[in-house]
């Protein structure tokens, strides 16, 4: 389990999936994600990973802007080019640390059903400091006999904040409109397989239509997608996670005339969902398991400040939502 904790950041990049600690392996290679998923039932995985999905959605929809000014940020008037990294962190204080579940039923093919019976106790989610609740029995529904046993995972991490770093490039402006891209090519992440990320934001200035407006106003729409696949030698070697979401926000900002400081804020409506699909496999049977999750965040209100020093721009903001987030960015603006 300590190995996973030491790899906290890459785990959180792949934040929408279930990982079982390697120390709890039972005749399978749980050193990589695909193997870990293969012994967990759908309802257990759904409850276990919900705090992870919540944190991932909160993080990916954070840090989308640093000012409501469209055009004029850089050293070339009306033209903007921004290259930087947004570091975001979802606060986990309100995330559930345990849940209760009686059993899962798995269709194992050829009309055979397997029932996974869990201990009559609180079961840990991925976030918290809870130890494993032991193991679950695999029961053949037709004969009502035990045919296998699988270990149950402990909480993976106990942290007050779940961090994520996202590279982003912005350019504009055309008719008061600019765009921003978030992109991570398919990248192998240690034992978890490969992850890729793409996001596109389009923003339009509203203050350009208001003569002598004392503040900058803008609206922005964002769509993002994340994919995670298992390693080539895993039973789950294909795409395990397909996550996507969108956000719409209204922005306002005000620059300080005598200093390179801008105060900004906004209201945002967002949705983020995760589709998980994997192969469940024990000595008693094999089946494809799929489920969907939605992140808890739907509306957030945020406020922040940015400072521009020559071509370096720094910003930090805080957002109130179901999962509160803090975001900080650093980049070059031209």
Image (cartoon, rainbow, N blue to C red):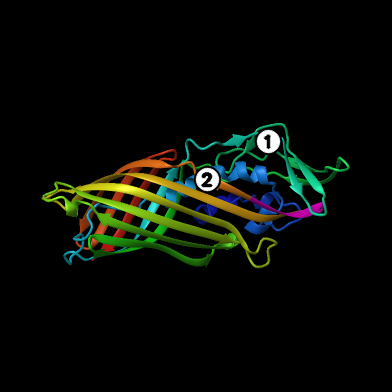
Nearer the observer, disc 1 or disc 2?
2
Residue indicated by mark 2 = 294
Q: Position of residue 72 (x, y in %)?
A: 18, 60
The image quarter in which residue 98 lies = top right
In the rendered view, does 282 fall on the left or right side of 123?
right
**Which residues fall within the magenta stretch?**
282-290
Q: Secondary structure at mark 2?
A: strand
- Tell me if residue 219 can be seen: yes
Which of pointers 1 and 2 lies earlier in the amino acid sequence? Answer: 1
Horizontal placement of 109 versus 313: left or right? right
Question: In this figure, which residue is indicated by the disc labeled 1?
Answer: 101
For the question of whether residue 153 can be seen, the reply is no
- Measuring from the top left, give residue 166's x and y in whole percent: 41, 58
Name which residue lies at 52% across and 45% down: 294
Q: Is residue 187 above or below residue 314?
A: below
In the depicted view, which residue is nearer to us: 172 or 326?
172
Q: CA distance from mark 1 to mark 2?
A: 20 Å
Residue 127 colored in magenta in the image: no
Farthest residue toward the front? 209
Residue located at (31% from left, 46% from top): 317
Q: Residues within 10 Å of mark 1 (few under 14, many from 20)?
A: some
Residue 239 appears in which quarter of the rendering?
A: bottom right
């Amino acid at each position: 389990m300590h190995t996973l904790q030491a790899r906290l950041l890459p785990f959180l990049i792949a934040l929408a999936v279930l990982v079982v600690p390697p120390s709890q392996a039972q005749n399978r290679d749980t050193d990589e994600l695909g193997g870990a998923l293969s012994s967990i039932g759908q309802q257990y995985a759904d409850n276990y990973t919900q705090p992870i999905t919540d944190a991932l959605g909160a993080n990916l929809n954070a840090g989308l802007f640093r000012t409501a000014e469209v055009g004029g940020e850089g050293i070339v008037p009306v033209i903007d080019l921004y290259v930087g990294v947004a570091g975001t962190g979802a606060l986990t204080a309100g995330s559930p640390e345990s849940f209760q579940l009686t059993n899962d039923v798995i269709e194992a093919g050829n009309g055979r059903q397997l029932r996974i019976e869990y201990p009559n106790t609180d079961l840990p989610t991925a976030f918290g400091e809870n130890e494993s609740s032991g193991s679950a029995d695999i029961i053949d529904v037709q004969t009502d006999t035990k045919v296998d046993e699988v270990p149950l995972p402990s909480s993976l991490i106990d942290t007050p904040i779940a961090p994520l770093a996202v590279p982003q490039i912005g350019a504009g402006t055309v008719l008061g409109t600019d765009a921003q891209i978030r992109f991570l090519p398919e990248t192998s992440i240690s034992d978890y397989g490969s992850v890729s990320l793409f996001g596109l934001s389009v923003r339009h200035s509203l203050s350009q239509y208001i003569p002598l407006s004392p503040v900058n106003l803008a609206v922005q729409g964002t769509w993002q997608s994340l994919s995670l696949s298992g390693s080539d030698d895993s039973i789950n070697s294909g795409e395990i996670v397909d996550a996507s979401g969108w956000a719409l926000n209204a922005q306002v900002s005000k620059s300080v005339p005598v200093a390179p400081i801008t105060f900004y804020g906004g209201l945002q409506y967002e949705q983020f969902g995760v589709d998980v699909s994997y192969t469940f496999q024990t000595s008693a049977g094999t089946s494809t398991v799929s489920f969907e999750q939605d992140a808890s965040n739907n509306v957030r209100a945020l406020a922040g400040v940015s400072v521009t020093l020559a071509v370096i721009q720094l910003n930090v903001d805080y957002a109130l939502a179901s999962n509160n987030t803090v975001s900080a960015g650093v980049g070059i603006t031209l």
